[in-house]
Image (tube, grey):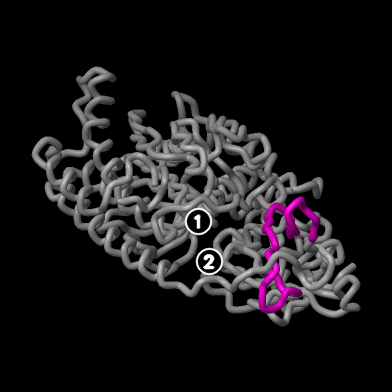
Amino acid sequence: MHASSRSPRTALAALALTVLALAVGPAPALAASRAPDDVADDLDARLRPLVEEALAVDATPGLQVAVVFADGRTWSDGFGIADLDTGRPVTRTTRFYIASTTKALTALAAARLDARGELDLDATLAEALPDAPWPADAHADDVTVRDLLTHTHGLSHPALGFRVAFTGQYTVDSFVDALADVRSGPRSFRYTNFGYDIVGVILDRERTRGWTDVVAREVLEPLGMTRTTAHISEVPADELAMPHEHGAHGPERIDLRKGDANMGPAGGHVTTADDLARLLLAELTGGVLDGEQVVPAEVIAETQRAQVVQERTFLHYVRHAWGLGWDIGTLDGETVLHRPGGFAGYYSNAAFFPEHGFGVAVLVNGGSTSAVLAEDVVAAIVDTLLGRRDALVRHARRLEDLGLQLAGARERLASRPAPPPVTDAPTRAWDAYVGDYAHEMFGTITVERTDDGLRMTMGPMASTLLPLADDADAFRTTLFGDDDVAAFEGGATDGAPAALRFRSEPGAAYARR
């Protein structure tokens, strides 16, 4: 448990003591005549306690927050711990994986190319990827690139999304070849990663996973997002916030399941809240940053235009439309465009309020349970900046609800059945299991010998293998995150097995090569 952790009850008591000291004025804007230092001090005094009290609920080890205004004012900082194993703190320069928040970057890059005539968002798939083996029912002569970006393409594939987001085991050419197995469904709005995965191939003219270079050229560089990258290998270890998930006693460190190979156009960047604030500022100002028009105003307007209707709710948000890379909806009745993202150990959100001229970016490394915390922070900041006199009361109530949710989650985790017992040695010799096991759709798993047993890898994902006491030809694994069993089968009992299966997916056999 990190040093700033306190019980929900203690956190709420401390929050209540700040009500009078932090009373918010009726207007969101600060006086223009104030000196810059005064402005920064005022924002810090109003916003910092909100974040610190939220962190004390212990739903995440750390978080990063940035607030940006259309007139250029900003406030940001890092809070808590980046890695519970080392105690390393979160600073403003710590980078977080942002999962689907990447979609806002990919869509903006595509919109810029469209505006210059280098890519036609209304081109059909047959025109955009003419060499792809589209099946007849994929409607490649009708579905467009814009449909891919607005989740109205109706296409799916049993394995490509898994390879792009998890294993990274694909080439662009193999991805295109696999489009022969695309399935078609209703063309109404349905949020998925798959459309953006295909857009990444369309952006990649050299067929080298070059979508990362396109996004860097069209978005990251002009916006000055210097600490944002799709190449996680370029990030020094002491600058990366490590992933955590909720355990029976609070956040617990988990394995990092991201590498360069499985960073995709639907979810493939690490960044900072300050960098995301640059994106939000560009959206608020029509593409003007530091006095220069770095992105054409019409491109920004196109990303914010309601392209299709959707009807979804997510935590505090009511979503009624989708732009290009942005959910469009309301938060407590206020118009908001936002794009969250979540993956094992991480959650992020970038949101802006065009009618009020400010945006908020929040990054956390607490996994699925920390999404509520992140959005509680966003809501509290919005309440405060809009001058709602009950802002602190509303914040306290949200944190109280979150504390109760976490307490219930901890009780459920503590009462889970114990994992099956393991033994010192498997049925066969350790080296008999070593090798590659392949599945035609899902890819290849490699089993390697280590000093103390076996290790299983599938692209950047990895897990130790612990032989079960009641079936020593089966091993406990967490390759896909949750506890699972990899059962080896076939072959001579004193030789190599013929295949392995996961008990959570008994139909998927990985054959030994």
What is the secondary structure assignment of the residue under circle 2?
loop
Residue at mark 1: 342
* Mark 2–mark 1 CB contact (< 8 Å): no
Q: Identify the residue at horizontal 80%, vertical 60% (top origin).
A: 446
Q: Look at the picture and state if 147 lies above or below 392.
A: below
Q: Identify the residue at horizontal 25%, vertical 61% (top origin).
A: 401
Gap between marks 2 and 1 measured at Cα: 14 Å
At label 1, the amino acid type is: Gly
Q: Identify the residue at horizontal 70%, vertical 73% (top origin).
A: 158
| Magenta region, main secondary structure | strand
At label 2, the amino acid type is: Tyr
Q: Can residue 208 be spotted in the picture?
A: yes
Q: Nearer the viewer, mark 2 or mark 1?
A: 1
Q: Is residue 451 left or right of residue 405?
A: right
Q: Is residue 42 left or right of residue 224?
A: left
Residue 88, position in %: x, y?
48, 35
What is the secondary structure assignment of the residue under circle 1?
strand
Position of the C terminus by quadrant: bottom right
State the residue lying farthest toward the front. Answer: 424
- Disc 1 packing (10 Å; few <14; some 14–19; many ≥20): many
| Magenta residues (range) | 446-475
Residue 239, position in %: x, y?
55, 33
Residue at mark 2: 191
Q: Is residue 465 magenta?
A: yes
Q: Can residue 458 be spotted in the picture?
A: no
In the image, 139 versus 25, the foreground residue is 25
